[in-house]
Amino acid sequence: MDTQEHMLDEIISCMAVGKDHPEMQRVQTRHRLNLVDFWDIPPGSKVLEIGCGQGDTTAVLAHQVGRDGLVYGIDIASPDYGSPVTVGDSAKFLLKSKLGFQTRMEYGVDLLAPETDFPAGTFSHIVLSHASWYLTSNEELIGIFRKIHKWGKKLCFAEWDTQIQNMHQFPHLLSILIQAKYECFKESSSANVRTLFTPQDIRDAAAEAGWIIRREQVIAANNLQDGQWETETVLRDYGRELDELDHLPDKLKMLIRSEVRLLEESIRGLDHLESLSAYAMTADSAEIK
């Protein structure tokens, strides 16, 4: 067994989902290893992870920083959010594992609330990974980028790349676009996709908040299960979503139904689905003028 496979085994053994879905978690964890490798976070680092969720990235970060480091994960979700294991149960499992020593996780944290604060320079790195599409607006993203500015000097970011590399990724992109349309009309949501950001949107928001992007990379994530999950979510839920949003313009509802038909047709023409690639970047803090 090579070094990375052994590392994967160690990390997955610390994760609750790894018990019942080891191969699924292996794919997800390998992707997080690729991200952390790109971010170049050294052992001993003090990391704030925003949107830690069930700890997919948290566990990899904790393994990377080691016992001399710290990973402090925060998330606005309540502990009972998520499936097949809730974020609260996932956190408990991870914190009791051998990675728990250097890990802290807290839920129900509104990052933009006045009471959420840290002294300047508390963290060496701030991570926001596959969590920006959960935000409600571009203004919220800019607000977060601005607020975290003083807490750490290096931002490590990742999100799905909206530029498809082949038609096997098209259903993932189309399912995201469909969800993003009806999410615009919700006052509250627990969906995975609430606001769509392209890489250029991220660059613009980071620049406005005073971050200077140093490195960017598109990282292949074709074999992740997320494309399949998002496609299934749309096909299962779009009818209910449209029924509940009775204030949607009829023309928009018709457009969404047409896009769902296009999604169904695209699936029939493919022998398999792939997830989008990931857009990753690192940025340094700069004085906001």
Image (spheres, helix red, strand yellow):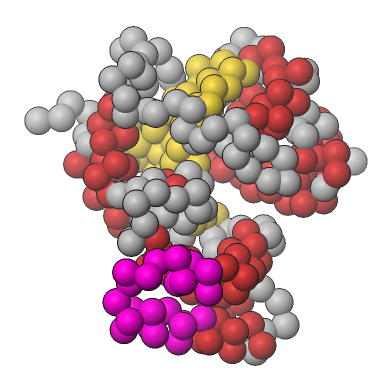
Q: Residue at x 29, y 77 (%)?
A: 249
Quadrant where the C terminus sits is top left
Which stretch appears magenta?
239-260
Q: Residue 189 appears at what percent x and percent y? A: 44, 50
Q: Is residue 208 visible?
A: yes
Above or below residue 164? Residue 75 is above
Q: Residue at x 43, y 19 (%)?
A: 124
Query: Within the magenta stretch, is there residue 243?
Result: yes
Query: Within the magenta stretch, is there residue 90?
Result: no
Q: Is residue 275 left or right of residue 148?
A: right
Q: Nearer the viewer, residue 233 or 269?
A: 233
Q: Residue furthest right?
A: 1
Q: Is residue 40 left or right of residue 138?
A: right
The chief SS type of the magenta part is: helix
Q: Quadrant of residue 288?
A: top left
Q: Residue at x 85, y 39 (%)?
A: 19
| Total count of labels | 0
Q: Is residue 94 visible?
A: no
Q: Quadrant of residue 63?
A: top right
Q: Residue at x 37, y 28 (%)?
A: 111
Q: Residue 18 appears at what percent x and percent y? A: 80, 40
Q: Residue 213 appears at what percent x and percent y? A: 32, 41
Quadrant where the N terminus sits is top right
Q: Nearer the viewer, residue 232 or 279?
A: 232
Above or below residue 171? Residue 185 is above
Q: Residue furthest left?
A: 289
Above or below residue 185? Residue 120 is above
Q: Is residue 239 left or right of residue 180?
A: right
Q: Residue 44 appears at what percent x and percent y? A: 57, 15
